[in-house]
């Protein structure tokens, strides 16, 4: 028995190994990861870790002893470079070859590069790995002004950290609002206002032309000729799926490694999970989606582990996500975008606010800001397919919890 090889020892890869053992799988399990060390969680990198509230050891998904106790081999610091699907073997950069009965691709995603002059200057950072976060946290201590390129989740979380540390921060965004791909305009406005009140400056509709500086980043220049002085630039303009290995092995890719409802690729011996995989979702009317969240990494891994231990089922888990930005706890259940009607429940300054998003007459997602109770109810509504009337949702007297039961 060759067992199961997992390429990528991140959130999804770790969970696959853990869920295989929980499901009773007894064959060899090997995680191959190109980062040094054991699997760790990324969310704190832009939050607690950046604020110095946790250290590298606190990020580990499990302590070292766990892997020995559960017979999960971790090949850290080595990259899978080729898949031989005919002979079912994975070639590693270190020269070793790992045979498999089943291969799971959990290669995650990488930061999208900023294609402008000066983007490679010292002082320009990205944030994806523990190594990135370590480098950032070290230099942040001596920084007076930060420019963040991109008003996505990572950019806003980092901007909130800067504001909390008393560092002047400007967020530069090409579109006209933050989180435009991810949240409703109403929610974006609330989030922007909160950051602005904390001292974060925004430049919207501002395309970056260059990072300027003599031997080191000193500012960001926009195409309309504005300059934002900064001694540190964080680029957070989204990610690209790590699909090259799959593509080179002849597996179909389209903004992610294409998988079916069981998270299986075209090859019955190869699955793909997490940030790198594009799966058909019942929460997107069957369209293929590629999600970048802990929930998707964990639930996708559980789905594949269940199939590999004799309990096959389609991947139908409700997508959910969170982002902590200073005093804001944003939680999203379902896939809100696109939607054609958004209904507000609650108020930002009184117990938090949720935005219920409808596509046609169906509830497709709920964005909650500092309103965790709604988020949990929303996940239940979306799992069961229950849709409350928009008028009822807007009524503070409406008992949403009772409706969801
Ligand atoms: P990853 O965790 O990225 O793991 C993939 C691993 O595979 C990486 O270590 C990669 O280097 C490795 N790899 C790639 N190719 C190879 C190869 N050929 N050989 C060997 N190894 C390879 N999500 C949330 O839901 N909430 C949050 O608040 C949140 N905050 C975040 C903050 C930050 C700073 C970041 C970067 C992400 C955050 N996310 C958050 C997203 C979440 O962390 C990811 O969606 C999740 O890690 C995806 O898991 P994954 O296993 O698919 O990919």
Image (cartoon, rainbow, N blue to C red):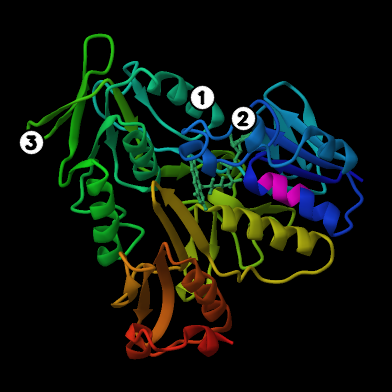
The answer to whether mark 1 and mark 2 are in CB contact below 8 A is: yes
Q: Nearer the viewer, mark 3 or mark 2?
A: 2
Q: Nearer the viewer, residue 210 or 298?
A: 298
296 lies left or right of 144: right
Give how far across and how far down residue 136 sits, in percent. Answer: 43, 25
Separation of marks 3 and 2 at Cα, in angstroms: 41 Å
203 lies left or right of 325: left
71 lies left or right of 175: right
Can the viewer see residue 67?
Answer: yes
Q: Main secondary structure of the magenta part?
A: helix
Q: Which comes sooner in the sequence, label 3 or label 2?
A: 2
Q: Which comes sooner in the sequence, label 1 or label 2?
A: 2
Q: Which comes sooner in the sequence, label 3 or label 1?
A: 1
Q: Is residue 401 above or below residue 142?
A: below
Q: Which mark is residue 56?
A: 2
State which region is magenta.
Answer: 13-17
Separation of marks 1 and 2 at Cα, in angstroms: 9 Å
Q: Which residue is mark 3?
A: 224
Q: Quadrant of the C terminus?
A: bottom right
């Amino acid at each position: 028995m060759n067992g199961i090889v997992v390429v990528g020892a991140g959130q999804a890869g770790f969970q696959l190994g853990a869920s295989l053992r929980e499901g009773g799988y007894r064959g060899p399990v090997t995680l191959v990861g190109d980062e040094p060390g054991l699997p760790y969680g990324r969310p704190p990198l832009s939050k607690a870790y950046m604020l110095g509230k946790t250290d590298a050891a606190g990020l580990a998904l499990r302590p070292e002893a766990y892997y020995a106790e559960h017979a999960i081999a971790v090949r850290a610091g080595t990259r899978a470079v080729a898949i031989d699907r005919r002979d079912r073997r994975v070639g590693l950069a270190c020269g070793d070859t790992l045979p498999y009965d089943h291969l799971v691709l959990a290669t995650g995603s990488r930061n999208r590069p900023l294609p402008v002059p000066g983007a490679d200057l010292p002082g320009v950072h990205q944030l994806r790995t523990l190594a990135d976060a370590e480098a950032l946290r070290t230099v942040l201590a001596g920084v007076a002004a930060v420019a963040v390129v991109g008003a996505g989740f990572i950019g806003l979380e980092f901007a909130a950290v800067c504001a909390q540390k008393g560092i002047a921060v400007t967020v530069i965004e090409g579109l006209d609002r933050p989180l435009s791909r991810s949240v409703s305009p109403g929610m974006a406005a609330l989030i922007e206002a909160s950051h602005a009140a904390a001292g974060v400056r925004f430049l919207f509709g501002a395309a970056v032309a260059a990072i300027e500086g003599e031997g080191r980043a000193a500012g960001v220049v926009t195409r309309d000729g504005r300059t934002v002085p900064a001694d540190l630039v964080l680029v957070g303009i989204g990610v690209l799926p790590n699909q090259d290995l799959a593509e080179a092995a002849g597996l179909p890719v389209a903004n992610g490694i294409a998988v079916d409802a069981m998270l299986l690729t075209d090859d019955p011996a190869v699955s793909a999970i997490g940030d790198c995989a594009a799966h058909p979702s019942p929460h997107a009317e069957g369209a293929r989606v590629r999600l970048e969240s802990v929930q998707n990494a964990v639930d996708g891994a559980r789905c594949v582990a269940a199939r590999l231990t004799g309990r096959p089922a389609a991947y139908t888990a409700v997508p959910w996500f969170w982002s902590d930005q200073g005093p804001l706890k944003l939680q999203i259940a379902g896939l809100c975008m696109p939607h054609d009607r958004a209904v507000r429940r609650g108020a930002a300054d009184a117990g938090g606010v949720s935005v219920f998003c409808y596509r046609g007459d169906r509830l497709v997602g709920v964005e909650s800001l500092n309103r965790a109770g709604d988020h949990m109810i929303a996940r239940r509504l979306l799992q069961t397919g229950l849709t409350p009337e928009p008028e009822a949702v807007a009524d503070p007297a409406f008992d949403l919890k009772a409706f969801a039961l």
